[in-house]
Image: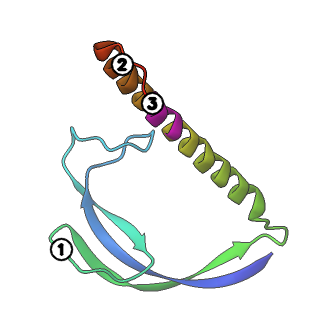
């Protein structure tokens, strides 16, 4: 394992409490919770800057980003293909409706 020191900007953020599944529970009042950012952003009434922190991250010696990158690209490709197929289906539907109205063959 190698150790990398990273810097984070810590804020306290007023947000709804999270349910065990990670979703927000809007039935309960908001609570202050720490949140780590990669840069310092402006403060607001529901986000207060606490301080800049350094922390150590352990990186496995056998870290290989390629499988995760391949999986992400395959998911992106599948989404693009689904979007393409949906768009073509919409165009075909519009074409069939237009051709049915005039009973003509498109050139």
Q: Nearer the viewer, mark 1 or mark 2?
A: 2
Magenta span: 84-89
Query: Which dot marks residue 77?
Result: none
Would residue 5 appear left or right of 8 to someone viewing this image? right
| Residue tagged 1 | 44
For label 2, the SS is: helix
Would residue 27 appear left or right of 106 to someone viewing this image? left
Residue 86 part of the magenta-drawn span: yes
Q: Quadrant of the C terminus?
A: top left
Which of the two residues, 65 or 99, is positioned nearer the viewer here?
99
Residue 19 part of the magenta-drawn span: no
| Mark 3 crowdedness (10 Å alpha carbons): few <14, some 14-19, many ≥20 | few
Q: Is residue 106 above or below residue 67?
A: above
| Residue tagged 2 | 99
x 26%, y 56%: residue: 15
Q: Position of residue 79 (x, y in %)?
A: 55, 43
Dominant secondary-structure state across the stretch colored magenta: helix
Colour mode of the rendering: rainbow
| Residue tagged 3 | 107
x 57%, y 83%: residue: 6
User: Which is nearer the N-term, disc 3 or disc 2?
Assistant: 2
Q: Nearer the viewer, mark 1 or mark 3?
A: 3
């Amino acid at each position: 394992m190698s150790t990398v020191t990273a810097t984070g900007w810590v804020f306290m953020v007023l947000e709804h409490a999270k349910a065990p599944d990670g979703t927000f529970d809007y039935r309960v009042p908001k609570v202050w919770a720490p949140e780590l950012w990669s840069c310092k952003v402006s403060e607001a009434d529901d986000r207060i800057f606490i301080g800049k922190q350094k922390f150590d991250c352990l990186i496995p010696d056998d870290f290989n980003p390629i499988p995760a990158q391949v999986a992400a690209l395959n998911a992106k490709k599948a989404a693009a293909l689904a979007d393409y197929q949906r768009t073509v289906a919409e165009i075909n539907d519009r074409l069939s409706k237009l051709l049915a109205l005039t009973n003509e063959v498109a050139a």
